[in-house]
Image (cartoon, helix red, strand yellow):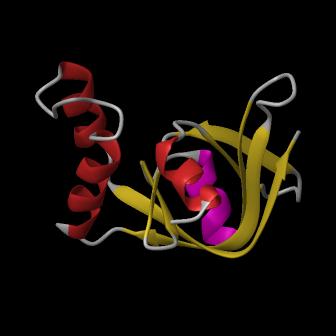
């Protein structure tokens, strides 16, 4: 596995950029999972990011760490987003995402988040850019 993929698998926060109804960028920090070359983000159909993707499925994202050299590294990409709403696929993906952040899904917060997740954003990145200093 290359450095970029290892980095995306272990980092915790992804900044997702969608375009709102007035054509302005809408940036949201989200929990995510990177697997098989795809980004998955669990969310709810009532969120602004979902409303934006329903109108324009072109997105970009950034994951980065560090504030001083030599520990600065980042990955960004653009891609096409789709919204997965089919059950049980949505819950299966949501559980995999949450297990990245919680040791168990029996945790009260994990259960609440899982209950609130009724869709998953799937992004197929088109081109990656990486940087380090």
Q: Residue at point 83% right, 23% down?
A: 67
Q: Which residues are magenta?
A: 48-55
The C terminus: image quadrant: top right
On screen, residue 115 versus residue 22, left or right, reads: left
Q: Is residue 72 magenta?
A: no
On screen, residue 5 versus residue 92, left or right, reads: right
Query: Which of 18 and 14 lies nearest the eye of the viewer?
Result: 14
- Asked if residue 50 shows in the view, the reply is yes
- Asked if residue 58 shows in the view, the reply is no
Q: Quadrant of residue 130?
A: bottom right
- At which x and y percent is residue 63? 68, 45
- At which x and y percent is residue 64? 72, 39
Give the prevailing secondary structure in the magenta stretch: helix
25 shown above or below 122: above
Q: Quadrant of residue 80?
A: bottom right
* Tally of marks: 0
Q: Name the outermost residue toward the front.
A: 70
Q: Name the outermost residue toward the left.
A: 106
Q: Residue at point 18% right, 20% down?
A: 108
Query: Which of 54 and 91 lies nearest the eye of the viewer?
Result: 91
36 shown above or below 132: below
- At which x and y percent is residue 118? 32, 54
On screen, residue 8 versus residue 119, left or right, reads: right
Q: Is residue 50 magenta?
A: yes
80 shown above or below 30: below
Q: Quadrant of residue 13?
A: top right
Q: Residue at point 19% right, 32% down?
A: 111
Query: Which of 95 and 1 lies nearest the eye of the viewer?
Result: 1
Query: Which of 40 and 66 lies nearest the eye of the viewer?
Result: 66
């Amino acid at each position: 596995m290359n450095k970029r993929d290892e980095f995306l698998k272990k980092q915790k926060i992804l900044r997702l950029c969608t375009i709102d109804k007035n054509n302005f960028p809408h940036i949201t920090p989200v929990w995510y999972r990177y697997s098989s070359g795809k980004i998955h983000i669990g969310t709810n159909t009532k969120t602004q990011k979902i409303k934006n993707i329903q109108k324009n499925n072109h997105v970009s994202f950034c994951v980065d760490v560090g504030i001083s050299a030599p520990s600065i590294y980042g990955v960004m990409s653009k891609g096409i987003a789709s919204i997965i709403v089919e059950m049980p696929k949505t819950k299966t993906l949501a559980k995999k995402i949450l297990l990245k952040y919680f040791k168990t899904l029996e945790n009260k917060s994990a259960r609440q988040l899982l209950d609130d997740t009724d869709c998953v954003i799937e992004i197929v990145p088109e081109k990656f850019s990486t940087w380090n200093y």
